Image (tube, rainbow, N blue to C red):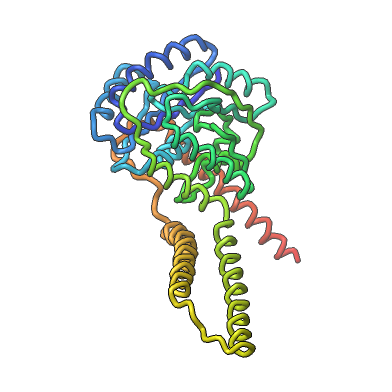
Amino acid sequence: MKRISIIIPCYNEQEAIPLFMEEAGRVCGGLTEYEFEWIFVDDGSKDGTLSLLKEYAKRDRRVKYLSFSRNFGKEAAIYAGLEHARGDYTAIMDADLQDPPRLLPEMIEALESGEYDSAAARRVDRRGEPPIRSFFARMFYRLIRHISDIDIVDGARDYRLMNRKMKDAIVSMTEYNRFSKGIFGWVGFRTKWIPFENVERVAGETKWSFWKLLIYSIEGIVAFTTVPLTIAAYLGLIFCVVAFFMVLVVIGKTLMFGDPVGGWPSLACIILFVGGIQLLCAGIVGKYLAKIYLEVKRRPIYLVAEENLDRDHESDRKGRQSSENTSVSEEEADKAAAEWDG
């Protein structure tokens, strides 16, 4: 019997979790040919989320939970769940039911056909969202598709089902600055997109304000393209060329007509404008340097304060790590043997 691991990142979802378990349990209860495990990742919740998860874990051995020592963010929660998932297939979905569990059978069917490595959900509309938020979201998807090498579908959700091969590929990407939508596209693999109409959260409040989404979008752009650096370089070149020709014009007018150099107010405006561009370009460079700084420190992506994972999870994870180390050792041994033979 194949096992499906379902990862549910949670942050202050005490009200939504019972509704999620009811709906997801109903859908999964009809899939009797599969075994399920539920991996809840508590991202440092301040409400009773962790206590509720402990109660569910007592009643159902399939319910597993990891509780972070603090709020590390949804990206860290997704990675933690993927790292500890041991199913043949792994799904990611939100606890607020904005990712409809009813799509899961269709996702399973897509993977079982053998034609796809992943089945992912995408929203075809944005009903219930503020218009300005929807506008900027669409602009973001258009922008990142044009300036990066990855294909992020408009309306794509983190909600997807993937096979072990794709899951292991994502887990192997241990970068600290994570942007899952970009990582899903970067690793590739054959993906079937399943459209659905937008669903509002069933309980609680969204944790994503407009400014948080804006910052998240900037993080995604910085993580998967160097085009902003190229733009900064071209802006510098353009202003240098313009300044050079302006100097020639001023010198020419002075020599030919004896005109005094005037226009100090306009000159001050130009200096302020160019100074602003310089600060913008310096900020772009600084953003990339900050990302490098965070990566080279090699801090863990998350820290676990409490968990109820059994030994099978740890042995599976350590087994994958040891197999990777073994493969490296074998390569080194072959190389050493070749050197001795030579």
Residue at the right extreme, as displayed: 342
State the quadrant of the C terminus.
bottom right
Q: Which residue is at a point 60% across and 70% down the rendered structure image?
A: 237
Q: Which residue is at a point 49% across and 37% down the rendered structure image?
A: 135
Q: Nearer the viewer, residue 282 or 25?
A: 282
Q: Nearer the viewer, residue 265 or 112?
A: 265
Residue 213 falls in image quadrant:
top left
The relative height of residue 28 versus residue 206 in the rendered view (above or below) is: above
Q: Which residue is at a point 57% across and 34% down the rendered structure image?
A: 154
Q: Position of residue 173 (x, y in %)?
A: 53, 47
Residue 117 falls in image quadrant:
top right
Q: Nearer the viewer, residue 130 or 110?
A: 130
The relative height of residue 57 versus residue 244 in the rendered view (above or below) is: above
Q: Position of residue 314 (x, y in %)?
A: 42, 36
Q: Position of residue 45 (x, y in %)?
A: 28, 35
Residue 21 falls in image quadrant:
top left
State the quadrant of the N terminus.
top right
Taking the image as shown, residue 210 lies to the left or right of residue 235, namely left
